Image (spheres, coloured by chain):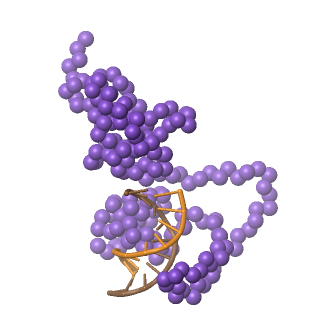
Chain colours: A purple, B brown, C orange
DNA sequence: CCCTGATTCGC
DNA sequence: GCGAATCAGG
């Protein structure tokens, strides 16, 4: 695969949207996230953040391969804001959750088999208890606890292939239509 | 362990 | 220019 105009444009757009390199790579196909990152740098749009000019004294010397003349490069000068009455709103860029799926709906334990519920309980005791930041495409995204309290985490167990949840949570999240079908009243 | 972007350097 | 390997961090 090569970087056609179209592909570059997609790259620019997605990178601008804050998508991760790996996500972009998947979207484009035929390239790895490394390729995407490399291209991003070559295009000169590496810094999604514009204002962070860190002086950064060269840490130098790694044992293996210091062959860089280490050019300070052009550090764009930045001005100290004269007025600072209040904290800047620090309105961040919209961030997009890396994990593919949106957060799951809370379980409504209506027509779920006792067996499945039991399993879930057992699983939740041994869950990985992951933080939001730690969720990936392969970690169960089932929320446990009250999001408003500190005692809130995500299951985090290995997901079932292609699903956002682990096996136990898949079984309560995706009920077969037949089981809830023909519930007459 | 999974992920993220950053950097280097042979091609 | 390209991107795998590697680095550094979460």
Residue A5: x and y in percent read 37, 72
Evaluate whether residue A48 shows in this view: yes
Residue at 39% x, 39% y: name it: A126
Q: Along the line of sight, which residue is nearer the eye, A159 or A11?
A: A159
In the visual, does A75 lie left or right of A123? right
Picture quarter with the C terminus of chain A: top left
Up the image or down, A68 lies above or below A129; here it is below
- Quarter of the image where one finds residue A22: bottom left
Picture quarter with the N terminus of chain A: bottom left
Residue A131: x and y in percent read 49, 45
- Quarter of the image where one finds residue C2: bottom left
Up the image or down, A176 lies above or below A182; here it is below
In the visual, does A1 lie left or right of A14? left
In the visual, does A97 lie left or right of A185? right
Residue at 42% x, 63% y: name it: A21
Residue at 34% x, 73% y: name it: A4
Q: Along the line of sight, which residue is nearer the eye, A131 or A179?
A: A131
Residue A52: x and y in percent read 63, 66
């Amino acid at each position: 695969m090569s970087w056609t105009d179209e592909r570059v444009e997609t790259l620019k757009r997605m990178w601008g949207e804050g998508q991760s390199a790996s996500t972009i790579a998947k979207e484009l196909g035929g390239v790895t996230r490394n390729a995407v990152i490399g291209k991003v740098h070559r295009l000169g749009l590496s810094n999604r953040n514009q204002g962070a000019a860190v002086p950064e004294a060269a840490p130098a010397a790694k044992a293996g391969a210091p062959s860089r003349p280490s050019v300070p490069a052009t550090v764009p000068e930045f001005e100290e804001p004269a007025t600072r009455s209040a904290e800047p709103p620090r309105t961040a860029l919209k961030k997009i959750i890396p994990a593919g799926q949106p957060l799951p709906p809370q379980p409504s334990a209506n027509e779920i088999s006792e067996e499945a519920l039991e399993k879930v309980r057992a699983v939740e005791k041994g869950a990985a208890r992951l933080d939001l930041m730690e969720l990936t495409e392969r970690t169960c995204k089932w929320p446990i606890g009250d999001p408003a309290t500190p005692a809130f985490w995500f299951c985090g167990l290995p997901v079932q292939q292609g699903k956002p949840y682990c096996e136990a949570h898949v079984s309560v999240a995706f009920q077969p239509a037949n089981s809830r079908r023909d519930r007459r009243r």
